Image (cartoon, grey):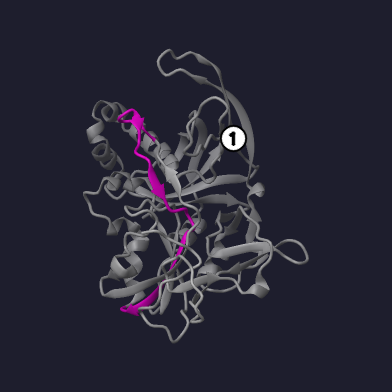
Amino acid sequence: MATFLTFEPLDVWMFRGNRLFGGGVHGMGLMPPWPSVVTGAVVSRALADNNRLGDVTRRPDQALNILQQCLGEDFGLTHLGLLKQERIWFPTPADLVVMEADGGGLEAKALEAKPKPSNGACCSAAFPYLCILPVSERKKPVGNIWIDLDGLKAHLAETPVSSDHLMPAGCFWQNDPRLGIAIGTSSRTVEEGAIYTTDAVSLNAGVWLIAGFSGRNVPSNGLVRLGGDGRGARIQKLSQSDHDAMATFGQPQAGWKGFRMILATAGLFPDGVMPPVVKKDHILELDGLTAELVAASVPQPGVVSGWDIAKHQPKPAHRIAAAGSCYWFRVISGDTEKLKPLWEKGLWEAIASDHPLMERRHEGWNRVWFGQWNPSDGTSPTMVRSSTEDVPA
């Protein structure tokens, strides 16, 4: 059973991206933070509660085993969002375009995955469907918009999303620029002229970070050190009603002719931004279910690293697919209910157990939601590959 926590800020939070610090560099704040940041705060608290922090630093090769002894072999982050006005919020997925409405305010339109027209048009991408908005519905897009749980449920069910379910990021937090001076790694003294700025994240009143975790003995009250500089946060359990709403959200249903797979957290894949469940010729095969990946909407990929406290060194840098990335699949045979293991445990189920990325499984990458999609009639499993979004293999 998942444990859902709220994180109440006791100060500003320093959620940094993957940029080095140095003279004249500005460190952009990252919101929401990498899932590994939130997981690390909870893991550190659990290890301290069990008097195992010293064991981890003395035996970094046993760090993962010690973590599993304290929190269970299936421990990991499952959800990451915000809580405001008793509503749960997430960044809008890549297949939902938010625009300025004619009378002011916001309106949302879902991208449509349509077969490529047979009129000689071509593009550089590799899929048979195009991700488009009808020309009549195109307006100036608005970025950095969040959607509440009810709005996201409607979107996954292919129903329109009302503006009441949308909110700009500025309603949740403000960036607070801070000035700093670099410290020499050997002398531990100030480096002359090495001045930098970095964004702190200051949550607005009544806003909390929320996260869900699988596993056992997950800390559910008290304080944690969260993000850069160890800024404080108070944790407590999410209300039971919100817990129940989150626990079944994004679950695949039986009988779909097609489906959308949306990354609930960023994807850490062996092959760039191509999901590991997709094999040769863009085919997914899972327990009798066969489906073809026909289109994708993936924002610009990023890079994530991090700091390994046990080994006292940076973690390897990896390319990631952004949270909210959307992949359209057309069912060839089988039942979409077979997707449930991917929803329960993430896309790690398709990665070899001895792959180096598996060391980061508990951090919360590769979690997915599923939504209904009704593909256009008259299509076949094999078509000329084309799309408005190019997803390299």
Residue visible at 22% across and 52% down? 353
Q: Quadrant where the C terminus lies?
A: bottom left
Percent from the top left, x then y, of residue 133? 59, 71
- Where 254 sits versus 318, above or below? below
Considering depth in this image, is 116 or 132 the residue closer to the camera?
116
On the rendered structure, is 195 left or right of 379?
A: right
Identify which amino acid the numbered label 1 is placed on: Asp
* Residue 220 shows up from this direction: no
Magenta stretch: give its range: 307-334
Task: Tell me if mark 1 has few (under 14), some (14-19) or many (20+) residues whose alpha carbon lies within 10 angstroms of its own.
Answer: many
Percent from the top left, x then y, of residue 243? 47, 56
Which residue lies under the disc numbered 1?
199
Residue visible at 34% across and 66% down? 340
Residue visible at 40% across and 37% down? 306
- Where 169 sits versus 277, above or below? above
Considering depth in this image, is 190 or 245 the residue closer to the camera?
190
